[in-house]
Amino acid sequence: MNIIGLYNYWIVVVLMLIGFFIVIAHENLIKKLVGLSIFQTSVFFLYISMGKVAGATAPILDENYQLYSNPLPHVLILTAIVVGIATTAMGLALVVRIYEAYGSIEESDIQVQDNNDRLEDYLEAYGHKNDTHLFNQDKDE
Amino acid sequence: MTAHFPILQVIIPLLAAPLCLFIRIPRIVGIFAILVSATAFLISCGLLQEVITGGTLSYQLGGWAAPWGIEYRIDKLNGYLLLLVSGVSTIVLVAAQTSISKELPENRHTFFYTAYLLCLTGLLGILATADAFNLFVFLEISALSSYTLIAIGTDRRALTASYQYLVMGTIGATFIIIGVGLMYMMTGTLNMYDLAERLPAVYESKTVLSAFGFFIVGVCLKLALFPLHLWLPNAYAYAPSITTAFLAATSTKVAVYVLIRYIFSIFGIEFVDMSLPLGDIFLFLGLTGIFVASVAAIYQLNIKRLFAYSSVAQIGYIILGLAIETELGLTATLLHLFNHALMKAAIFLAIGAVVYRIGSAQLSHYAGLGKKMPWTMAAIVAGGLSLIGVPLTVGFVSKWYLVVALLDKGWWPVAVLVLISSLIAVIYVWRVVEWIYLTPPRIITDEIKEAPMSQLIPIWILVLANIYFGVDTRLTVGVSKLAAQSLFGVN
Amino acid sequence: MTAIAITRMSDLFAVVMLSGIYSLLSASLFLDLDAVDVAFTEASVGAGISTLLFLATLKLVPRYEKKSRYKPTLALGVVIATGALLIYGTLDMPHFGEADAPVHQHVAPRYLNDSMNEVGIPNVVTSILASYRGYDTLGETLVIFTAGIGVLSLLMVSRRTKEKALQKVPADMQNQIILRVVAKMMLPLILIFALYVQFHGDYGPGGGFQAGVIFAAGIILYTMLFGLSLTQKVIKTEVVERLTAFGVLLYAGVGIACMLLGGNFLDYNVLRHDPVHGQHLGILLVELGVGITVAAVMITLFFKFTWRTVKHKYNQ
């Protein structure tokens, strides 16, 4: 009973971990956002699950029903869904701009380009324009 | 009217932000934003005054009593921070008028001010609220608007920095709502003070412990505690200078506030002590953060990045004060919050003024500027001295209190380490001084003039505040002490 | 399950479609858990708008993920640590569906028992959303507005580019006569349904947010079939942008009005002599504010992404 009573939460945990894994392990910026939204959705499940009362009905008052599920988590999650879509929209807009600026949406490609930018700054500051040794070293990272 | 002050504080910038879209004329929007922020500042002065003399203020939104509706509650701690945030924001906005005209294309100015006011709304909302979920909502407002403020610039690296911040920030926020959800699950309430009453009954529960864990990790992501700081240096370095000045001075400070509020007012220090060795963890992370970030700062070529790493180090000091878990330690933390905001706002605004003139934040381009822009450079140096903790600056005051608190606790090795870390600060500040004053100019500097008055005045207000609060410590130390006492008194 | 498939796929188009399906599945699960409002929102947002935005982005960026760029060890470690903490946390949780869990004992009962007398509408979710925790909803509207501002400032297309591009753009799907006729018939229905959801939120599931999304979906459908230029003739971008702000102002304005009438911020009781009537009026107005902002922001988002595509296609 102890474990069966918690099964719903464990499903939530699994979903959460999948989402979280996509966010940190993947390099593709779009896929990260998909992962992020899975991660957020799983939190929605956590809240909604705790609001459920066995045998109850949706919290719209009616004389025919006595037992309702807890409405408060529903309200909170409505807000959270909105926050989620806002974040996604913002993230996607950034991805579009990043692609325009870098020509790639893979994290490692972008990092290489950023490192090169920084290297140019370095060369400019210390003026070792011919120091190819340093150049290669940084590129390997 | 005074009864409505707690809400007006937040509502005024909230209403002003959408109004900006109707005004649409960049110059007027700018002045409008200053007025709004200044009003918020005046209200916060009134609030702090009232809180100190009359005690905690509570405001019920929608007229619904606390655990059912949302409550705003102003005590000494957040009254103090409201003052800081709205004050710094006003000064930064004054400098923004000219600065962004150089750094942003004109058609983005209105959006910039709108996002800025939204961010201000979010930060003030986080500070004022006494509702755990409402805090999350305003956290997201401030976060989304800071992503905009960072990415709005013209440097393409700002885009990736903003994206990185978005991903990290969202993970942090999601961790926070997991924490809030688990707490809600065990207590059935979202109001912070109701939580504080009901949590002791379930202290033993594993769920509460895990809620606390998620919450702490989430907030630490937001406040960029080492090693969760990776988003910060890039975000600060490539954002428009005004954004950097504003965010560096306020947003991490507000995250620290959230941490303090949860540890002391909600969970209570007893719970923290018996559940997790949080003091030791913070001590370790704080110290490593200070050293790693300070050393990293030495190697930076971009002056904004340099001071961004220094920010990460300063967060280390702030957390160190928390780790001590005594009233003195907390006082040191609160002092350093305030003082660091003053230093960093001054430094980043001064850098903004240089960017305005030469269009670059590369340290190498600063060569020889000491003669060309003496006042701006003096401001950077003054801020740097304050970062090191030289007497007569605010930096000295907070370091002094920190060391005293450490000695009081008997942690003298840590105190020694703090002093050593100041020496590293000397090195990176010296590097800046070296470029500014001792290196012959690399680029043609003939046409470079001193920064315009509209920027010099706000910069020097902050610098003078740095010195004034370094000498006359009655206000800052007084309020910090009161706030720290009340936090320990509650528990 | 769908989520696992997403981690393995490298065709981003399929990933996005799968995540849409995943959202739809979530929505039905929410329904099963009695959260009708949440299910409604998740279906329209997760499966609708967010999938649409992902697709609009995919039109602008490469469709395939590069292979074998994993760095799973560290990630796995972090994920497992998080999972362990979560599972540990679940051990002391009240069991799923149990009626005497603390959540059902404190705070919530008042909403269920008294909201009919205090607020006077049957949908408890709406009364909490718009009244008890109305300030959260104002915050939520502001979040949407913030996202609108963010996207607006990031994906700006100047008027000149627009005009230049417009001359070259054919309306997409010009030839799909059946689709166009069907859409023409559906559009009024969608818009009417949106209005129904908007104003019926007091009694059944729905409210400003869902209505706004549906309304926006109607407009977006129209745009997809008849082309941007035609839609822009009907709906001016500038107007839509101002409407995003107007919704927030309406919401906060109601709050201010309450203050001027002597109540606290957002205390609708003072709006009319009878508190319950006041609540009705207040909720109606704020829901309208939410609806306007949401619809306007969603439309703006879609326009901005589409303009970006147009710019890339025809302006090189």
Image: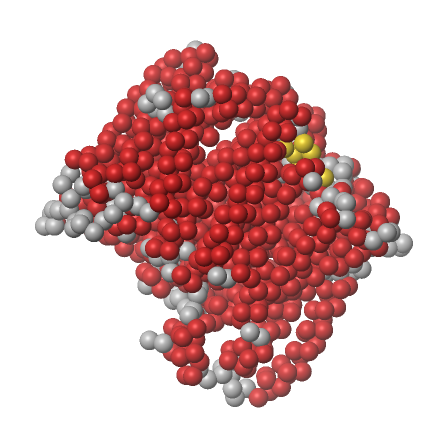
The outermost residue toward the right is: A63
On screen, residue B427 versus residue B307, left or right, reads left
**Residue B430 at x, y percent in the picture:** 23, 31
Q: How is the image coloured?
A: secondary structure
On screen, residue A98 versus residue B423, left or right, reads right
The residue located at (26%, 50%) in the rendering is B358
On screen, residue B102 versus residue C258, left or right, reads left
- On screen, C247 above or below B263? below
On screen, residue B317 versus residue B180, left or right, reads left
The outermost residue toward the left is: A130
| Most foreground residue, B290 or B27 | B27
**Residue B490 at x, y percent in the picture:** 64, 21
The residue located at (53%, 61%) in the rendering is B23
| Most foreground residue, B32 or C11 | B32
**Residue C228 at x, y percent in the picture:** 51, 78
Tell me, yes or no, if residue B162 can be seen here: no
**Residue B355 at x, y percent in the picture:** 30, 48
Q: In the figure, residue B413 lies in which quadrant? A: top left
The residue located at (45%, 57%) in the rendering is B27
Q: In the figure, residue C214 lies in which quadrant? A: bottom right
The outermost residue toward the front is: B453
Q: Quadrant of the N terminus of chain A?
A: top right
Q: In the figure, residue B201 lies in which quadrant? A: top right
